[in-house]
Amino acid sequence: MTQHSFSFSDLTPDLLLDALNSIGIYAESGLLALNSYENRVYQFQAEDRARYVVKFYRPQRWSDAQIQEEHDFSHQLVEQEIPIAAPIKIDGQSLLHFQGHRFALFPSMGGRQFEVDNFDQLEGVGRFLGRIHRASQNSQFQHRPTIGLEEYLHQPRQILEQADFIPDHLKNAFFADLDCLINEIGQQWHTNWQSLRLHGDCHPGNILWRDGPLFVDLDDARNGPAVQDLWMLLNGERHDQIAQLDTILEGYSEFADFNHNELQLIEPLRGLRMVHYMAWLAKRWQDPAFPQAFPWFADHKYWEGQVLAFKEQIAALHEPPLQLMPQW
């Protein structure tokens, strides 16, 4: 992969406008860059007074077939009246091409920030996650991956070992604790779950609230256990998380059954995300947007903090998994 394609350096304002013009969309306002680092995403108003969002996909991350599966999944959910931001089809095609770039056009769908401590909203999110999972259980992604230890732990460890970020005086402690974390997760990981097509990155920042939830950014959609779309909505002390989980599942269970054995995967999944996130930053560091947005990643204090975070996550893995009170 060349520096040129990796860093989006040829994605100039003129090219952005030319790409939109090629599909008959003419921007009247400027292009407002939205908070996205993996791809390049812009909001604008067109001549027809409609507001749109255009997403340019990072080169060599997903194949065309993998992106198309994401689009097809979102359209299937929209057909079932599930509030998902789905790409617009232009002449029957949602995945668009221009001068070597792949992009998609979305309607701009505003909303308020989802309130994670609002239990009415939390139940509403759970209700629609149940609907998403019910709609997704009849087939699997054929081109997108399934959540597993290789992609989220073993490959990231190799990336971190080859990267030149970890201070020399911390390397022994860092990799010793990382290997301990990987070992603990490996012992607790199980595959006693039905694999579903997931949103994949269902954290509060990917949910807007209007009259109900609106789910955005299916870029990390993949196969996996249902709990992957639930655990990132939990926060606070253990009793807080139990109350939040109970509220989510109250709405969820109206539309889909939940396998409570998956609760054992919450802390392993948290560990997977922790390791994968560090490797993602290391892998993307050649993109100039990353040092600007995450300057702390190159600071010794960050890596000292990660050694402590590994120990804390190992301790969390030794705690009993979250368990809901039985319903009578």
Image (cartoon, helix red, strand yellow):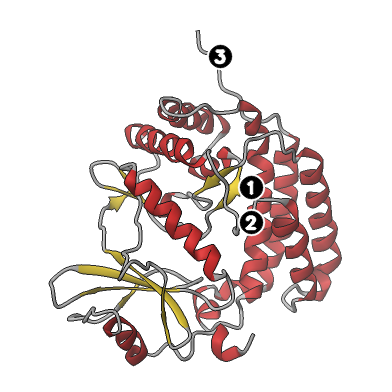
Mark 3 and mark 1 lie on one chain; the one further toward the N terminus is 1
Mark 2 and mark 1 lie on one chain; the one further toward the N terminus is 2
Going by the picture, which residue comes out furthest to the front? 92
Of 161 and 139, nearer the camera is: 139
Instruction: Tell me where residue 259 appears, x and y as whole percent.
Output: 60, 28
- Occupied quadrant, residue 168: bottom right
* Mark number displayed over residue 270: 1
Question: Is residue 83 in sight in this rendering?
Answer: no
Mark 2 vs mark 3, foreground winner is 2
Badge 3 crowding class, 10 Å Cα cut-off, few under 14, some 14 to 19, many 20 or more, is: few
Instruction: Tell me where residue 157 appears, x and y as whole percent.
Output: 77, 64
223 sits left or right of 105 in the view: right
Question: Is residue 254 in sight in this rendering?
Answer: yes
Residue matched to label 2: 145
Name the quarter where the N terminus is drawn: bottom right
68 sits left or right of 311 in the view: left
Instruction: Tell me where residue 78 appears, x and y as whole percent.
Output: 33, 48
- Label 1 SS: helix
Of 304 and 186, nearer the camera is: 186
Instruction: Tell me where residue 272 appears, x and y as whole percent.
Output: 68, 52
Q: Amino acid at mark 2?
A: Pro
Mark 2 vs mark 1, foreground winner is 2
Q: Amino acid at mark 1?
A: Arg
Residue matched to label 3: 326
141 sits left or right of 261 in the view: left
Badge 2 crowding class, 10 Å Cα cut-off, few under 14, some 14 to 19, many 20 or more, is: some
